[in-house]
Image (cartoon, helix red, strand yellow):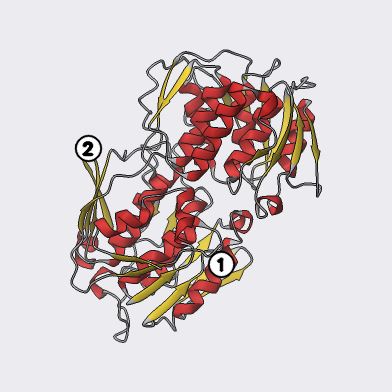
Amino acid sequence: MNKQQALLSFPKGTIINATIRLTGSKSESNRALIIAALSKGLIEVDNLSDAADTVTLNEILQRLAKDPSAASPIDVGHAGTAMRFLTAYLSTLDGTFELTGSKRMKERPIKLLVEALWTLGATISYLEENGYPPLQIKGGLKQATDAVQIRGDVSSQYLSALLMIGSSLEKGLSLQIIDDLTSEPYVRMTLKMLEEAGIKHTWTQNVIKIEHQDFSAGRLVVEPDWSAASYWYSIAALVPGAQIALPNLKEYSLQGDSRIQQLMLALGVKTTRTDDGVLLQSISTSEQHAAGLGAQEVQSSATAASSSNDPAASSGSNGTQNDLSTHTNLLEDESGIIAGEAPIMEIPASSSLHQDQVHRNQDDSIIDLKDCPDLAQTIIVCAAARGLNLKFTGLETLKIKETNRVKALQNELAKIGVELLEDNFVYTLNCSNLHFPERVNIKTYDDHRMAMAFAPLSIFIPQLEIEDMDVVEKSYPDFWKDLQTAGFEVVTK
């Protein structure tokens, strides 16, 4: 089947003053669906994402609720979160299930999660290659122990999958995290949503404990998606004078990707809280100076608690919140992401970029994306378009995502003369040969974030082709329509 392409252009002189209503958070939605299923009807969910991954997971869970014996085989397609969450969830159900996915899904490792579930007493076998889907899962987990260890530096979704079933296990769960914890905000999100559903936990040093306990009746309201918001930050950073309103988006959010606010502040985008959401505004270099901005090191790994891995401190969460519609300002004290000050550097006269918006340091800045790797493509492409030779760390998980995102970025950035160089887990942009051809074709590699991260380059490239425009259905189905709302021209080929 031929894939549809999007031909993008951005008319010269266009002023962006747009209101964009974003879908619900995919990350929150997928967790809310599993929590609701585990609660056996006690928890209801509002404002679910319309992302394909969430739709897929919801349909699977509805089939399982209706007749578990008829639900297998279960095909998650490209939905990696569904694969990981269902691997744990199905272990708690009665029945035998085959869990499979797309060709790429069968190349994405799941060994660490399966081994952790084996330790707990689950019966899971590999149907093809060891360590990879598809899986056969025999439910009715007979718990052997509550104690399990798992590496934290591979995928936070492994931890979230285990944590969500913890309260349903007869002996509860004592989860010890080995090595550094990647994407920590997503683990915090899981625990906070469990807390809002009545499930208490403690987090002491590197051990999270959840006792066997019942869910409380209530409602989980999913916030709009900060991951989707990140593409609008990129656009605001590249278009002088842009103003983009994002209704219902919470400045302080459970979502780790809300850190785009601080990361993009150093790239010239100011976030202002409004009565019904947030407003993005591109700001000039002089305005950045006036605000005291400048970042020798931009770190997204700052946390609210200086000595504890848990926002509620090591003593754990106390009490149960029955008003499930209101998220605590979990990241409220995590605004110190941009540290230090540095002088503004001038862009070379030959650059076609907007000089008054470029803000960078004499020493290359470092952006640590360990806690929000899904922002990597957006920020890297935006920085490349601005000609900023930034350094990035915390990208280790990108190679096991929908595609090898590091290689995909290297391939596509080369089309505008930019190199992404890798040296001992530090990735550096070399923009010395940056140029914008009249026409560029961007491959997506079946990766929704590749399509959306590169789309803003149409601001500089008169004819930008995005292969397989339908790939955005995975997380942001209205992306192309919303681009048109903001003044971009989108032609389907």
Callout 2 secondary element: loop
Q: Residue at x 37, y 35 (%)?
A: 223
Q: Left of 139 or right of it: where is 162? A: left
Q: Left of 86 or right of it: where is 454? A: left
Image coords of residue 81 (percent x, y): 58, 41
The quarter of the picture where the N terminus appears is bottom right
Residue 480 versus residue 318: which sits nearer the camera? Answer: 480
Residue at the disc numbered 2: 276
The quarter holding residue 432 reads bottom left
Residue 490 versus residue 158: which sits nearer the camera? Answer: 490
The quarter holding residue 348 reads bottom left
Measured Cα–Cα span from mark 2 to mark 1? 37 Å
Residue 427 numbered tag: none
Query: CB under 8 Å between callouts 2 and 1?
Result: no
Image coords of residue 361 (percent x, y): 37, 69
* Relative height, residue 276 to residue 471 (above, below): above
Q: Residue at x 59, y 13 (%)?
A: 213
The quarter holding residue 18 reads bottom left
Q: Residue at x 69, y 22 (%)?
A: 93
Residue 408 numbered tag: 1
Point out the residue furthest to the front here. 1
Q: Earlier in the sequence, mark 2 or mark 1?
A: 2
Image coords of residue 270 (percent x, y): 26, 54
For disc 2, the neighbor class at 10 Å (few under 14, some 14 to 19, many from 20) is: few
Q: Amino acid at mark 2?
A: Asp
